């Protein structure tokens, strides 16, 4: 893998945006997120972005909230996954995004498409599926197509709530009339909890994906995914190699090299 200190490198078709720290990564990613949103609005009149959950994106969302950007009213916000909890729960990805970004910018409430984690997981997944199908129909596309998909990656190489061994990672039987799902409720044995997640079909359809990975603990998984792995079963983040669109990995030195600065 050729990696330059200046911050951009190519590895297996992936663009690596290297930053010196998580804070520097957030600032670099914020500029690119706004550029993608502006391009989508210029070309299609609106922008659809799916937010990542977990802890890493909070710094990016805070940086976005501080940037002068008058296009938020044309942006639709979706979520790559959610925990099966109330929207005001400390574990809610929606709550994290609301606290760091959504409450600070002028996005119409109707443009914030959250998973209804307060409902039964299967019901929440059905309702998100319906919302995604409505989006796909409006876009006149076979799958809901995010202009920008933000994702994180766990130390076990999971992404969204697609964990190693998930049945959602198995290639669906392509049968006539069987339509692949875009949203799902999954029970995660390792966490003994339910999660709500977009499916591989929705991830693959994204125009652009930014994967946000910082911290030394992520190095083995990042090296595995960017280096050798294309096996989804043990490294779900390898799905990003199957994207039809462009992928940029926003990483810090600790994640890329395994050593803190
Ligand atoms: C979630 C995320 C999940 C996250 C990774 C990394 O709901 O937790 O969608 O996929 O991106 O677990 O999480 P951290 O950023 O907290 O390390």
Image (cartoon, rainbow, N blue to C red):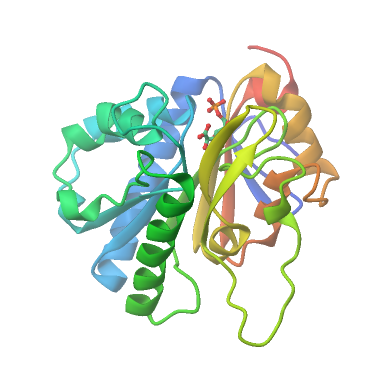
Q: Nearer the viewer, residue 112 or 189?
A: 189
Q: Is residue 123 above or below residue 4?
A: below
Q: Is residue 241 above or below residue 140?
A: above
Q: Nearer the viewer, residue 82 or 192?
A: 192
Q: Which corner quadrant of the figure contains ligand 1?
A: top right
- For the C terminus, give its image quadrant: top right
Q: What residue do we see at 68% from left, 18% from top?
A: 216
- Residue 240 pos. (x, y %): 65, 53
Determine whether, in the image, residue 80 is placed left or right of residue 224.
Answer: left
- Residue 61 pos. (x, y %): 34, 32
- Residue 241 pos. (x, y %): 70, 56
- Residue 9 pos. (x, y %): 67, 43
On the image, which quarter does residue 126 sit in? bottom left
Determine whether, in the image, residue 79 is placed left or right of residue 203.
Answer: left
Instruction: Determine the residue located farthest toward the top in the rendered image.
Output: 261
Q: What residue do we see at 67% from left, 38% from top?
A: 158
Q: What residue do we see at 71% from left, 82% from top?
A: 175
């Amino acid at each position: 893998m050729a990696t330059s200190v200046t911050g951009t490198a190519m590895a297996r078709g992936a663009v690596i945006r290297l930053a010196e720290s998580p804070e520097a990564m957030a600032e670099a990613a914020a500029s690119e997120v706004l550029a993608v949103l502006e391009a989508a609005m210029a070309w299609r009149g609106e922008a659809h972005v799916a937010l990542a959950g977990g802890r890493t994106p909070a710094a990016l969302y805070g940086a976005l909230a501080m940037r002068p950007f008058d296009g938020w009213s044309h942006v639709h916000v979706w979520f790559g996954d959610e925990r099966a909890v109330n929207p005001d729960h400390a574990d809610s990805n929606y709550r994290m995004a609301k606290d760091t970004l959504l409450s600070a910018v002028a996005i119409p409430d109707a443009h914030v498409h959250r998973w209804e984690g307060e409902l039964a997981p299967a019901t929440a997944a059905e309702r998100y599926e319906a919302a995604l199908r409505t989006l796909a129909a409006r876009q006149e596309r076979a799958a809901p197509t995010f202009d920008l998909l933000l994702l994180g990656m766990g130390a076990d190489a999971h992404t969204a709530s697609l964990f190693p061994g998930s049945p959602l990672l198995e290639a669906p039987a392509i049968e006539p009339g069987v339509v692949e799902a875009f949203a799902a409720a999954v029970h995660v044995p390792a966490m003994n909890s339910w999660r709500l997640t977009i499916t591989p079909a929705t991830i693959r359809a994204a125009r652009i994906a930014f994967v946000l990975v910082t911290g030394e603990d992520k190095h083995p998984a990042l090296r595995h995914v960017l280096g050798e792995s294309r096996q989804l079963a043990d490294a779900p983040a390898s799905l990003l190699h199957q994207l039809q669109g462009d992928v940029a990995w926003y990483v810090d030195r600790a994640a890329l090299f395994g050593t803190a600065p």
